[in-house]
Image (cartoon, rainbow, N blue to C red):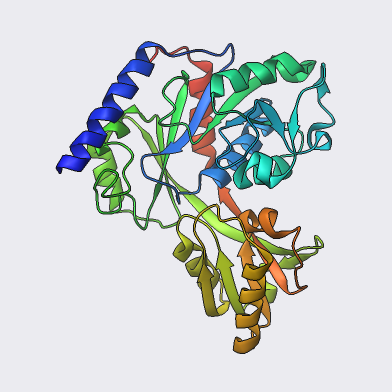
Amino acid sequence: MTFLEAIYSFGCSIKKNYWFKHQKHLPFKVISIGNITTGGTGKTPAAIALAEGLRIKGYAPVILTRGYMGKAAGPCFVGSKKNINTLELSGNPQFCESVEEAGDEPLLMAEKLKNMPVVKCADRHEGGNFAISYLSGEHRNKLVFILDDGFQHWKLYRDVDVVLLDGASPFGNRRLLPLGILREPLEELKRADAILVTKTRNSGLLEEIKALNSGARVSFAEYAVDSFIDIGGRDFAQESLKGKKAIAFCGIARPESFKNTLISIGIEVCDFVSFRDHYRYRQADIDFVCGRAEKADAEYILATEKDGVKIRALNLRKNILFARAKLKLNDDVLSFIEQKLNDNPEPK
């Protein structure tokens, strides 16, 4: 470990130990979805998939997120009131409806998870109590909280910790920040109850995970593009784009994963433009991409749904399509999580 890594690790350890001793609790079960590296593992699709799976099992999921880069101070419900209009709300809670207020990922989750609240607040304990104070009726009696990007949010107690690893590059160069992508030493994976390997089915990773945490439930989580959608909401089947020439762009943590996904389903990606994660697009950026598409004689311009929530207010061409990606959780993982929710474990 280098000197810079040691300083980072020391500070991280002090913060973690302090909050573990002063952890706050919510009166309902909490599941954390997180990672041990910086971005790019599919946390947003995983949170969506988990919320959908839990609702099928009879729970009433609420996602708690800090809303990275969202300007709203919180706590607030993300999206418009119509997103959760079938729920019984008491009082007049605050809503943050724009990508500038909520952040791109929270807004995407809120729009895909109809009638499942997404709450933005840097303090997830405060956000949870905000949701509890406004939700009433049957929904309140079945609440379960999903802590988005929560593996390092030590101040809130969770009943289940789910950690995602990118199968193609699970640990980067195995260095801690600021020299690598590790948020914590690899040994901290021992806190995880379940570990999901996403994007690439890396069987060789299983032995190392077992050595780090022999008790965790390990599973591969299939991540795939289901279809594409244009700005008007029209669906395009994945098969309809096979063999088509397209230019792609995105502003996500690991842009190469999006490009590889498009190539894997048979799209001819003739050009690719990457922006930094959570990038706030301007009209000039879209015009630049469209210009490159014209030069390449591309039939389509492809981006992610996360990009879609940030550019839909701009002047867009009809051939810009957004990939609707979905992460599929195995039934055994959902059953394992439900079993953990029904247990009454001692605090970790």
Q: Is residue 26 above or below residue 306?
A: above
Q: Residue 50's quadrant in the figure?
A: top right
x, y percentage for residue 303?
62, 65
* Image point (54%, 26%), residue name: 338
Q: Quadrant of the N terminus?
A: top left
Residue 150 spot, x, y in % from top left: 47, 31
Q: Is residue 306 left or right of residue 25?
A: right
Which residue sits at x=41%, y=23%? 154
Q: Residue at x 25, y 54 (%)?
A: 173
Residue 48, by quadrant, is top right
Depicted 337 relative to depicted 163: above or below = above
**Which of the image's four quarters has the C terminus?**
top left
Residue 180 x/y as whole percent: 28, 49
Q: Is residue 242 left or right of residue 152?
A: right
Q: Residue 142, can we see it? A: no
**Which of 313 and 153 lies nearest the eye of the viewer?**
313
Number of on-image labels: 0
Quarter residue 282 falls in: bottom right
Task: Tell which of 290 and 244 is nearer to you.
Answer: 290
Which residue sits at x=75%, y=31%? 95
Most foreground residue, 267 or 305: 305
